[in-house]
Image (spheres, coloured by chain):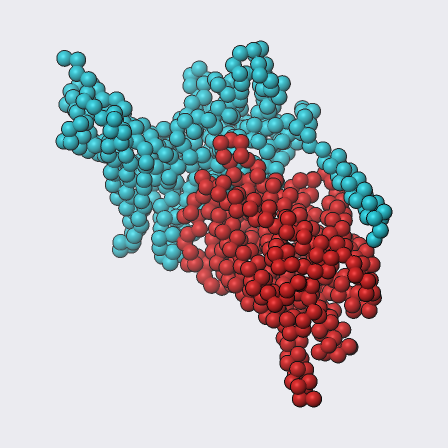
Chain colours: A red, B cyan
Amino acid sequence: MRIKGLMKITGSQFIWTLLIIDGCNFIPFIKTAIVEAKQDAWISILIAGLSAIVLTLLLVRLSLMHPGKTLFGFSRAVLGPWFGRIVVLPYFAAWISISVMILRYSGDFIQSVLLDKAPVWVVMLILSMLMVYSAHGGIGGIGRYNEVVGPVFFITTVVSFSLNGRNLRWERILPVYYDNGWLQIAKGAVPLTTLLGGESLLLLVLIAFMANPRKAPLLSSIALGGTTLTFVALTVLSLSVFGPALAVRLQDPFFSFMRTVDIMEFIQQIDIFMFSLWIFGITTILSAHLFVVSYELSQWLKLNDWYALIWIIAPVIFVAAQLSPGATMYGPFFNWWSYYAFPVCGIGIPLLLWIATLVDGRRRRAG
Amino acid sequence: MSAHRLGLLLLALVGVSLIAGCGNRREPDHLAFNMGDGLDMTKDGKLEVSFQIALPSGIGGGDGTWGGGGAAHETYELTSAKGINIYDAIQHAQKELSRELFPGHREVILIGQPLAEHGIAHLLDEFVRNPRSELRSKLLVVKDAEAKDVLAQKAIFEPFMSMGLRRQQDILRLRHVYFHDFMSDTLTEGLDPYVPAIGLTAASKPYYYGSAVFNKAMGLKTVGFLDANETAYANWITGKQAGYECSLPIGGGNGDNISVTFNSLRKSIRTRKAQDRIMVDLHLSGIGAIVENNSTLNPTRAPDRRTIEQAINRKTKREIETLIAKVQREYRADIFGFGEAYHRQHPLQWKKVSGKWNDRFPELRVAVQVELTCERNSGLVTSPIDVN
């Protein structure tokens, strides 16, 4: 295969890429957690983050059993050419469908807040172009990009925490636990676990490109832990500004939280900074998915050129996003994602691959 | 991909983003900056919204009204329009304007008394739903007048009345009632909202009256007003005010009086259940400085200072008890948040009263304890001026 783009990713690039992917994907879901768990949403997020770390470590472990091989490479190695080919199909479905969702959601959101006179397809087209441009730099290109954007993103977020002090009413997050109980808290945690864990499915491919794969468990735990802590803090802060009852009625508690900053009558409307950084992050998410799908699919199709597939898959994602019904689809989609797609791709198939790897190893040692 | 094709892609990208930018042009000189909204109900029961719009020609430049001197330009325009809801009224107002109404800098939302008494529960959605709407606006009720009457007045210092109203709240050491705070209080069960109220003097000058009490159970309508003194007490209990002034007759002599300014106001609300009743122990404290003393009491002497403090504490306690009884009996709206305190302190017992708090609030027994001292700013603690 012809080497194209940058196909190696360093440790810090890996951390920032994961942080950005998880962080930007998480922002719209603060509200999901608040809808279920009200003022205890931060507990849901904490639980979701910890469970996602456990699931991710298992996926990383599986990937490390096959150094240098991506998902399709090792599933073919342990399950044989035919069955190995079939088990990766759900991953293509999952990755493409979540890209479609993210593209559509971002398009709708950017359009409603910033560009309400532009048609959604124009917004999505621009995002798709950014996605293609970024993906065709290879995973190393995406990593370099995030190394720059990541620190800016997280510094801005943390600085914004300190600007809203006057609006905080800590009593709004009380009483802890009693109003909602474990069932509601768990209901809030499930979609977030599968969301964060779902992003970790990318690791089954990405680890093969790491300069130093043995560090992957540590680095991915740092990234997920960082995301979780940031969002626990953000959720507590935005709940104590709005209270749970208002937070569930806002379009997005995260950006609204940024909007309430009002210092000395001129430090206002800082949400616009977060917004542009968030768009950077969306580009990362989309391009990472596009890269992973294109690369895996080129292996699957025995093509030598994964580049060409970018130009096929990106239009498919764009058209599907344009044809999708938008807001009414998010609820059903994430139900499907939480209760079908993720259990299959994040737990079922990896378990199968794990067992097959062990059996394979034993057979090899025996033979 | 060759460099050539990459260049083409970039060009297309720039082109498309430019088109989107033009399609969505919202330059400052295409916008009408809406500084304040006034919501009123007309005599025939229709909604009327007034928009105070900043006129850049009146404000800009160094010689405008900001600087003080120079030609007296108009700094704002007041446009009113009727509609079946807020958005409808905005659309009707837009017909008179060559620039797009932009609510992103809205300072205040004023509600006229007739509308406030009619209820505003059905008017809140637009403010939250519109992504360009401003949750940082401050909400105020206009007592005995319509909202547009206040917006139409020229502010003394500021270019617009809406800005003047906001700055006045800072001077009064009020913690702003932002629209998002109002919404949050409205949506929380054990709490009723109350917002600052503006009155008009006989000469039609707006002044800070106190606050308007909203009752949620009755459709989020104003059920009564609190004067400035009562509001200061209510704000103390809810933590919305940093300090207040107190003047009272004191001592034996005729016409003897004293003024104290209080700071560092603290509160503690403890709730408990005794038999079948919910009890509230309200403990209020603060530290004050004597700012005027026309009496023979000498605050540098400990016994005299204690006399002053006792008199202030007695008066304050009595007035707060009267206030709480009035709000419980007449307004039946838990503006003090006793319900939320009970909810947070006894989350399990709360479930028994949840949904019925509005009926339980008037039955609460509240024990008030006031502990004000006059020890702040000891530099001011001198003997009274004695002219004899």
Name which quarter of the figure residue A272 lies in: top right
Q: In which quarter of the image is the C terminus of chain B?
A: top left
Q: Residue at x 78, y 38 (%)?
A: B19
| B142 or A330: nearer the viewer | A330
So how many labels did they put on this image? 0
Asked whether residue A299 appears in the rendered view, the answer is yes
Residue A210 % position (x, y): 66, 63
Name which quarter of the figure residue B251 lies in: top left
| A184 or A26: nearer the viewer | A26
In this picture, is A322 found above or below A163? below
Q: Which residue is drawn at 45% across and 61% down?
A: A181
| B28 or A251: nearer the viewer | B28
Residue A318 % position (x, y): 77, 53
Residue A213 % position (x, y): 63, 66
In this picture, is A274 found above or below A74? above
Q: Residue at x 66, y 48 (%)?
A: A280
In this picture, is A321 found above or below A200? above
Left or right: B18 in relation to A157: right
Asked whether residue A344 appears in the rendered view, the answer is no
Residue positioned most to the bottom: A366
Residue A79 % position (x, y): 72, 78
